[in-house]
Image (spheres, rainbow, N blue to C red):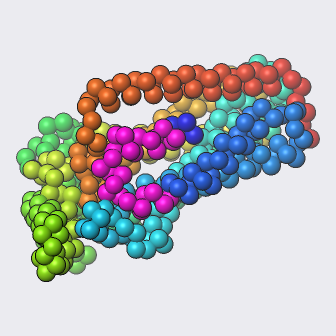
Amino acid sequence: MATGLILEFEFGTNWSNYSWFVGDIFGAPLAIEGLLAFFMEATFVAVMFFGWNRVSPRFHLAATWLTCIGASISALWILVANAWMQYPAGMEFDPAQMRNVMVDFGALFSGIAVNKFFHATISGWCLAGVFVIAVSAWFLLKKRNVPFAMRSIKVGGWVGLVGILLCCYTGDGSAVEVAKHQPMKLAAMEGLYHGNRQQSIVAVGVPNPNKKWNNNESEYLFDISIPYGLSILATHDPNAFVPGVADIVNGISITPQGDTVNTVSYADRIAIGKQSQQYLRNYDTARSNGDAAAMALAADSLKNTFRYFGYGYFNSVDEAIPPVPFTFYMFRIMVIGGSWLVLFFIIVLFCAYRNHWLQKSRIMQWICFITLAIVYLVSQSGWAVAEVGRQPWTVQDLLPRSAAISDISSSSVIVTFWMFAAIFTLLLVAEISIMCRQITKASKTNLEVA
């Protein structure tokens, strides 16, 4: 909640060009989130944390559910806004206002938005499940409230297992949407420069740091691949063509029938984008001169070329390519870590139901602690793939990061960054100490199991 509140202020201070450009499209979801969800979770989270034995059990349960519902509603609107940045739909650019305006509110709930919401929120189930298991394993290690800990482990295990399996399903849907709307991100996730039909996926590998889209270096220093894997992941068709970075830059694709077709190359997109920006300047000049005919002509030309408007900020195609090695590694951390979580939840549940092995095995208890760190790493690596993989765009194809920032000095950004870093560090320390105190208090209390 604290970081979200500051972030909304930063949209105006550090990202003013972005805030103006996205207009009411980005503002509407955030306004709904702030008015409805933020106040709900901010109100009831204190009751949930500190109301135990201070309010009635029913009221405490209601406060807990309302906090969860508020957080979920908050996540919905934030992720809808984020998904729009990845796939800007339901809007038109109005040259008179120099900003985008919403024309179809329902289009905000695109396939990317739906998959992103469920994938992100359900991943929270996995994190919560591991957290409950790790805390309960600490109880077992200290031999305190063992029956309560065992029951909590079973609940956390089932919630986590269902969550990670649903994450795999929603992740598959997200991959299909990314392949459809953000093929460059998919190519970066795979470290793929030259695509093929029946494209394999690299299970484990090391990208070549010297590889560029326009040289002949090998893509990997080492790799172990799964045949047909990327074609299946991207399209659910093992024979499908998946383009690489060089294919996308050069505007080359292959149809399901095996025919080579030309799409719009990045060089052409840059040229069209610069022309689109010139049409916008022509419109502004015509409006200043009161020339209605020239305004109409410029507006029509702008509408026809606006799809590549953002490319006009680039001077070379290299500026439009995301960091490939970083995205490649983050994707594998997410997938390998997620695979471990599937195995982890199965093992934990097996041990919990099988002669109380968890009570006896110190190794298994320590594995629970280590997995808590792993699940946080997996969660953050997933966000790294989503956000770094779409670079350099703030709004896909329309507004690059370099054009979205405010005209402020770097010293101002540095000062506010470290100021907020210090504040958030203090809040993090306070939050961790509160949780540790509550856990320690619970370990010293005789918790009955119904």
Q: Magenta segment, principal secondary structure?
A: helix
Q: Quick one: which residue is furthest to the bottom in this view?
A: 293
Residue 227 visible, this angle: no
Q: What residue is drawn where x is 32% and y is 70%?
A: 92
227 relative to 170 in the view: left or right: left
Would you say residue 192 sits in the magenta stretch? no
Viewer-proximal residue, 254 or 75? 75
Q: What residue is drawn where x is 89% and y is 25%?
A: 446
Magenta region: 4-29
Residue 57 coordinates in the image, percent (x, y) = 88, 42
19 relative to 154 in the view: left or right: left
Viewer-proximal residue, 31 or 265? 31
Residue 262 coordinates in the image, percent (x, y) = 13, 71
Q: Which image quarter is the C terminus in? A: top right
Q: Is residue 89 above or below residue 382?
A: below
- Residue 307 in which image quadrant: bottom left
Viewer-proximal residue, 180 or 19? 19
Q: What residue is drawn where x is 19% and y is 54%?
A: 245
Q: Which image quarter is the N terminus in? A: top right
273 relative to 1 in the view: left or right: left
Q: What residue is drawn where x is 58% and y is 32%?
A: 372
